[in-house]
Image: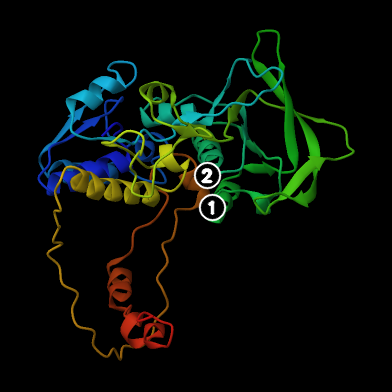
Amino acid sequence: MIGGGLAGMTAAYFLALMGHKAVIYERRDKLGGMLRYGIPNYRFPKDRLDEDIRAILSAGLIEVKYNTNVGADVTVQEVFEEHDAVFVAIGAQVGKTLRLDGADAGHVESAVDMLERIGHGKIPDYAGKTVVVVGGGNVAMDAARSAARCGAKDVRIVYRRRQDDMTALDTEIESAIMEGIELMTLQAPVSIEKDSDGNCSALIAQPQMIGPYDRAGRPSPMNANKEPIRIPCDVILIAVGQDIVCQPFEEFGMPTKRGVFVAGLDTAVEEIPGVFAGGDCATGPATAIRAIAAGKVAARNIDEYLGYHHKLNCDAQAPEARENNRIPTGRANITERPAYLRKLDFEHVENPFTYEEAMQEAGRCLRCDHFGCGVLEGGRDK
């Protein structure tokens, strides 16, 4: 497994359960990928992540080679020759840049890099500073909310489309607004202004208006007949997407298309037998659960490629469904710490269930497959 993120760890875990020795090459000193170095602690506590990693490694037959960057410290060809199969799961962990005049100014950096530094425990000092985040996805929200926790005086998100067009989760946008972060929508960055020391002093943006729908089904922004605006700032974080480090693997012979590896639904790379690819590096940046799914698929098909057909027994049986006459109750929703408190630290924002809430939630009938819509025509059976 090249990459110790979700896809790589998942594949290693299931291969180990099948009796294969799994070797993970991880370029950092800890496993976890973007869950550790991309998602801040207040959204996903790292002690919970470490619990899962310990459970994965406890399966045995898993060796981890930390601080080993495949493509730099060791070639892809060497890894391929030393193992019976290779699963490439390097993720998409390099932030994209914007081609703007002044983009080389000081204190302008990728939001991905900033979040990675925080993941390493290196908290930037933004005390008294004004931070501008460019972008409208989940990374932009994470960067903006993290900047506020790093002491920033003001944090603004600049986005060229409308709030409705943002790709970030609605809950993340709402949380950012609650924590005092300003959304400046329909503003397209055009240049970065520098001060006498070469550091950024302002972002120049061109106001936009909404135009025709694009191929993705979103209305396209277009320049409005308005004068550009100047947004003063001390730090600019670019959160406009993520790239994949493909070059060493392309030199090895792995095909790519539009910056991602070409692999089948079974994660196999057709051109090179024994090589598989999955996760963000094969789909582009996506969700954590899709990376986990890719790791499971890869483990199954690597097992088949090696000439086996192992089956895993989950050792669990679902109990027989019974008529449930409990009084229907609403779903117990997780609450969050007040925004004025949680924005001051990186502690988890969600409050745990009380014992009573947990018991009530566990007692609700979820067997709709037997007693609800699943018994109807066109339901579970069909």
Can residue 39 be seen here? The reply is no
Judging depth in this view, the residue of 255 and 182 nearest the camera is 255
Say which residue appears at 75% left-offset and 43% top-offset.
186
Say which residue appears at 75% left-offset and 38% top-offset.
187
Judging depth in this view, the residue of 162 and 372 nearest the camera is 372
Horizontal relation, residue 28 to residue 337: left or right: left
Q: Residues within 10 Å of mark 2 (few under 14, many from 20)?
A: some
Extreme-right residue of the structure:
225
Q: Would you name the residue on which mark 2 appears?
A: 138
Image position, residue 295 (x, y; %) = 30, 46
The answer to which quarter of the image holds residue 120 is top left
Q: Are marks 1 and 2 in contact (CB under 8 Å)?
A: yes
Say which residue appears at 59% left-offset and 35% top-offset.
240
Q: Considering only order in the chain, which callout, 2 or 1, is on the residue closer to the N terminus?
A: 2
Colour scheme used in the picture? Answer: rainbow
Q: Is residue 9 above or below residue 237?
A: below
Q: Residues within 10 Å of mark 1 (few under 14, many from 20)?
A: few
Q: Is residue 170 above or below residue 128?
A: below
Horizontal relation, residue 230 to residue 291: left or right: right
Image position, residue 40 (x, y; %) = 42, 39
Horizontal relation, residue 50 to residue 92: left or right: left
Can residue 311 be seen here? The reply is yes
Q: Secondary structure at mark 2?
A: helix
User: Which mark is drawn over residue 169?
Assistant: 1
Spatial CA distance of label 1 from label 2 is 7 Å
Q: Is residue 180 above or below residue 253?
A: below
Q: Amino acid at mark 2?
A: Asn
Q: Amino acid at mark 1?
A: Leu
Extreme-top residue of the structure:
197
Image position, residue 280 (x, y; %) = 42, 40
Q: Secondary structure at mark 1?
A: loop
